[in-house]
Amino acid sequence: MSIKTILVYLTHPHVEAWNFRPEHKVMLESRVPGLKVEVCLNSKDFKDRLPQSEAVIVWFFKEQWLESATRLKLIATPAAGKDWIEVEAREGLQVSFGGFHGSLIAESVVGAMIYFLKAFPLSMSMQKQKKWARVKISEKLQSLYKSRVTILGFGKIGNAIAERLKPFGCILTGIKKNPTSAPAYFSGSDRILATENWQTIFAETDHLICVLPGEVSGVLKPEHFKALPKSCYFYNVGRGNACQENDLVEALQAREIAGAYLDVFEEEPLQESSQLWETENVLIQPHLSAVTPQYLEHFVEELAEKINAGDFGPQNTSDE
């Protein structure tokens, strides 16, 4: 498939970094010779022009839109997950998801780990009180060195997180449905386990990082939190339905785990009535772990490479 024109409808009312701007249009056209980028600023304009389009870039796409999109051959989205694209790839139609999020999310996860292990919340509290609390703070300090990290969902993002943790001296375990060979940066103590063996590692986990997609729901149960060491921290940057919110709150309040960094939730926005807001040792981000001012620049670079490499040819009819 030769892409000559691509229709873009990428706007977001809250996060500026998710809005397709004129510089992104210039960048994409300059990276793909002969490509014309047409930008829509509202849904009506997009749906009016959709019947003539062979390729689109969107945040979301509804199944019923295909009725009028008879010429459509490619749906591309910067999003990593399939939550907002109701269409599956099929004969004559390809769906492309962003694959650039790993390094960005890894920064957020590493930041959260340091936040907990170096007792930054306590230090800030003592700072506000103008207290030189050396003894109190020193008793809380920990290190990533030789800590045992389990990554539940060892795909592109999970792998990117692991690779950035390795220089800290972490011992890594990746959990994957279909285990592959170990990455080159793994050392002798690191391993990849199949999904059916994932529970065996819980008792040896200092940090449990969840990077599961939305289609994997309710996999973490109360007994799994109980199986973790009380000193273990939990991080969720996949999807919020990996566990029930009440189960996580109970685990935190009962001190079955030491704390949690949460970027995703069962229901978003997180309701004001949620107990997570007031639960001790919880760090909440509103689904922003991959956000950076350069977010769409990374996407444009990646998409341009795919187009120039011929990834959207007739021989490739499956999503990533």
Image (tube, rainbow, N blue to C red):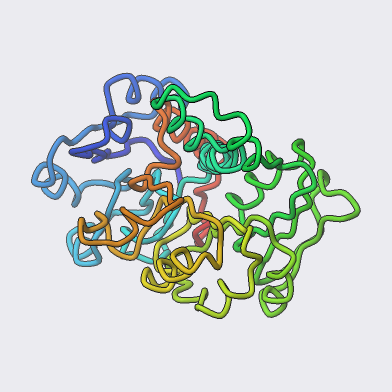
207 sits to left or right of 15: right
At horizontal 87% and vertical 55% (from top left) the residue drawn is 189
From the viewer's perspective, is residue 96 above or below residue 22?
Answer: below
Q: Nearer the viewer, residue 11 or 165?
A: 165
At horizontal 70% and vertical 62% (from top left) the residue drawn is 205
At horizontal 66% and vertical 65% (from top left) the residue drawn is 229
Q: Nearer the viewer, residue 34 or 154?
A: 154
Image x and y of residue 210, in percent? 55, 60
Q: Nearer the viewer, residue 308 or 320?
A: 320
Image x and y of residue 200, in percent? 73, 76
Q: Residue furthest right?
A: 188
From the viewer's perspective, is residue 208 above or below residue 166?
Answer: below
Q: Residue furthest left?
A: 44
75 sits to left or right of 289: left
118 sits to left or right of 84: right
**Residue 147 visible in image:** yes
At horizontal 58% and vertical 55% (from top left) the residue drawn is 233
From the viewer's perspective, is residue 75 above or below residue 138?
Answer: below
186 sits to left or right of 248: right
**Residue 91 visible in image:** no
Q: Count up the numbered dots.
A: 0
Image x and y of residue 225, in percent? 56, 71
Q: Nearer the viewer, residue 81 or 164?
A: 164
Image x and y of residue 220, in percent? 52, 74
